[in-house]
Amino acid sequence: MQVTDMLRILNVDAMQLPHAPSPPARAEEAFARVGRTAKPCVACGQPATATRIVDIPDAGPRWIDTCTPHMIASTKAAGTSAPESETLATLRAAVRQAGVDAALLAAPLAEAECTRG
C-alpha cells in the first residue's frame, strides 16, 4: 500500500506524525512505543497495538502507531485482494460509473473501536 493511501485511510496529516529514525524500526524501539505505555492510535486515540516507520515524501521518516482495527485497515499487500461477492462487485461498479471517489468497507469499525470517523 502506498504511504499516501495509508494516510488517507487513517485520515491523518503526515506533518502531525512524530518524527522517527530511518526505517526500519528496531524491535526495541517498536516495543517501547506499543509496550507497557502504548502511544495512542493516530486515527482514533485508542491504545496502539502496532507501529511502523514510513518514509513520507517532504516529511521524512515518521511513526504510525495504530490500534488493531486501524492497522488492519491500513495494511494491504500490493496486488492482493479478498474475494468480492457479486453484490459488492455490482455496488463497486455503480460507484465507479457514477464517478464518485469512495472507499467501500466490508466490515466497518464499530463506534466503540473507533471514536474518530
Image (cartoon, grey):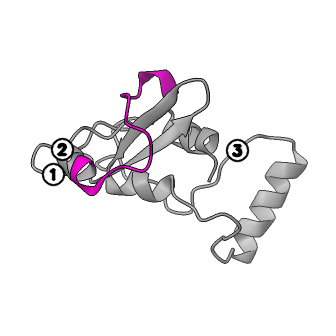
Q: Quarter of the image containing the N terminus?
A: bottom right
Please give the range of residues in magenta: 13-29
Q: In this rendered view, identify the residue nearer to me: 48 or 85.
A: 48
* Circle on res. 38: 2
At label 3, the amino acid type is Ala
> Which residue appears at 63% of the width and 74% of the height?
82
Q: First in sequence: mark 3 or mark 1?
A: 1
- As for residue 21 lying within the magenta part, the answer is yes
Mark 2 burial class by Cα count in 10 Å: few <14, some 14-19, many 20+: some
Give amino acid for label 1.
Gly
88 with respect to 21 (left or right)? right
The Cα–Cα distance between marks 2 and 3, rounded to whole angstroms, is 32 Å
User: Viewer-proximal residue, 66 or 53?
Assistant: 53
Give the percent coordinates (x, y) of residue 22.
43, 39
| Badge number at residue 84 | none
Q: Is residue 54 above or below residue 71?
A: above
Q: Residue at x 76, y 40 (%)?
A: 101
Q: Position of residue 72 (x, y in %)?
A: 45, 59
- Quarter assignment of residue 90: bottom right
Circles 2 and 1: CB distance less than 8 Å? yes
Query: Are the residues at dot 3 and dot 1 in contact (C-beta closer than 8 Å)?
Result: no
Q: Which residue is identified by label 3?
A: 102
Residue under circle 1?
35
Residue 9 falls left or right of residue 97: left
The numbered mark, 2 or 3, whose residue comes first in the sequence reads: 2
**Circle 2 or circle 3, nearest the eye:** 2
Q: Is residue 82 magenta?
A: no
